[in-house]
Image: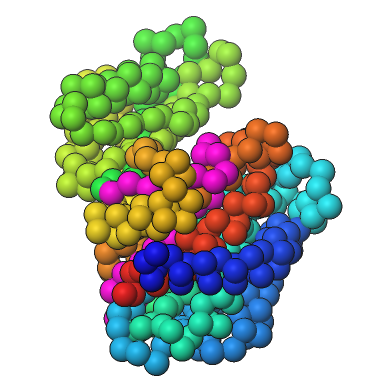
Amino acid sequence: MSEIKVIQADYSHLIEKVKDEVIAWRRYFHKYPELSFQEEKTSQFIFETLESFGNLILSRPTKTSVMARLIGPHPGKVLAIRADIDALPIQEENSLSYSSENPGVMHACGHDGHAAMLLGTAKVLSSLQHQIKGEIRFLFQHGEELAPGGAQEMVRAGVMDGVDLVIGTHLWSPLETGKIGVSSGPLMASPDTFSITVTGLGGHAGLPHQTVDAIAIGAQVVSNLQHIVSRNVDPLDSVVLSITKFLGGTAMNIIPNSVEIAGTVRHFNTELRANIREWMERIVKGITEAHGASYQFTYWDGVDPVVNDEKVARVIEETVRELWGEHAVAQAKPNMGAEDFSAFLKEAPGAFFFTGSGNRELGTDFPHHHPRFNIDESALSNGVSMFVHAAFKLLD
Ligand code: NI
């Protein structure tokens, strides 16, 4: 038997001991959800709970985030582990003993579980301080759900200074409990956004020749923008361009003066961004000018894509295999969702992985951001176990 397996057995015992506490923390967060950048009680609870563990150096990088540093007696690398802690503006439709008591606000993405798992990890690892080589930094991040996100604020506050490696996870309802989704390379996309105003000349619907019809022109803008992904982008690059808003008009007999169009562009290659912006503006300009209208075009760069480091991803995968065997390893498919974890990855190599929490029997397979979203709480100790074991492997 290898030494690693002996050590792992010991950690599993410690994880078993914090299991119930992690569930209780998660339920507390779930009951009292707070929106992005307003995580006051949540961060206070995290701070006080961390304080009770001992061995940690605590700070508040921003008003509603928390950082805990665990410095070992042996020299070594610095590993950061991140959890996001914010909730969403959704009215919960679950009837649970710990359902949200904050009307219109809900932990519908699993960040309650993320915060609880990182607390559990900090409790276990702080009790093993004597074994730590280097340092482990626990980052409880505010405001993940609201662009441009809290991660970059924390980075600006210096939480990544001196960090060599960074890891994080997302509880994942499309993946069944017991499985961990890992992959190297691109995992989550960059979510750029845009807004277009087409201004024509409003007037009577029965006298279109006296107007410049912003609706007809706006419709052409929408259909011509579809050419970008189908005709301009290399088919081997993944890009999504979705129009999500088309607003204009007030009545059946009035041609409105202007329409408002907005949407999102998702991609994994930030070098494409400048081209896409240029192609879009060329179309908007060409179409509106051709019909005698004018336009306003604004494009906002989203957070960077999440791109996993190959070596760190391999360590995560090995950890899963050693803990539960080959059947627990799931290949994470890249998706067009976004995560501001990328701001931490910009500072140090690392990996983001998915912790399966879907269980049809328990009804925890609703999609993220659904009013009936919930997690299989047995996934929480899997997440803690991943963090604890991966931390030792990465610092070795
Ligand atoms: Ni989320």
Q: Identify the residue shown where x is 37% and y is 40%.
A: 331
Q: Is residue 199 above or below residue 109?
A: above
Q: Identify the residue shown where x is 73% and y is 59%.
A: 27
Magenta stretch, main secondary structure, is strand
Q: Residue furthest bottom?
A: 73
Q: Is residue 271 left or right of residue 104?
A: left
From which residue to which does the magenta span run?
160-184
* Residue 298 makes an appearance in the image: no
Q: Which quarter shows the N terminus?
A: bottom left
Q: Residue furthest front?
A: 1
Q: Is residue 248 above or below residue 209?
A: below
Residue 235 position within the rendered picture, expressed as x and y whole percent measured from the top left: 19, 26
Asked whether 183 falls inside the magenta stretch, the response is yes
Q: Is residue 62 above or below residue 273?
A: below
Asked whether 48 falls inside the magenta stretch, the response is no
Residue 87 position within the rendered picture, expressed as x and y whole percent measured from the top left: 62, 55
Q: Is residue 81 left or right of residue 64?
A: left
Q: Identify which residue, 236 or 359, lies in the foreground.
A: 359
Residue 200 position within the rendered picture, expressed as x and y whole percent measured from the top left: 37, 26
Q: Is residue 254 above or below residue 241?
A: above
* Residue 200 makes an appearance in the image: yes
Residue 2 position within the rendered picture, expressed as x and y whole percent measured from the top left: 37, 66
Q: Identify which residue, 197 or 230, lies in the foreground.
A: 230
Q: Which quarter shows the C terminus?
A: bottom left
Q: Identify which residue, 87 or 350, lies in the foreground.
A: 350
Q: Identify the residue shown where x is 41% and y is 83%.
A: 132
Q: Identify the residue shown where x is 48% and y is 51%.
A: 324
Residue 72: quadrant of the picture: bottom left
Q: How is the image coloured?
A: rainbow
Q: Is residue 133 left or right of residue 67?
A: left
Number of numbered discs present? 0
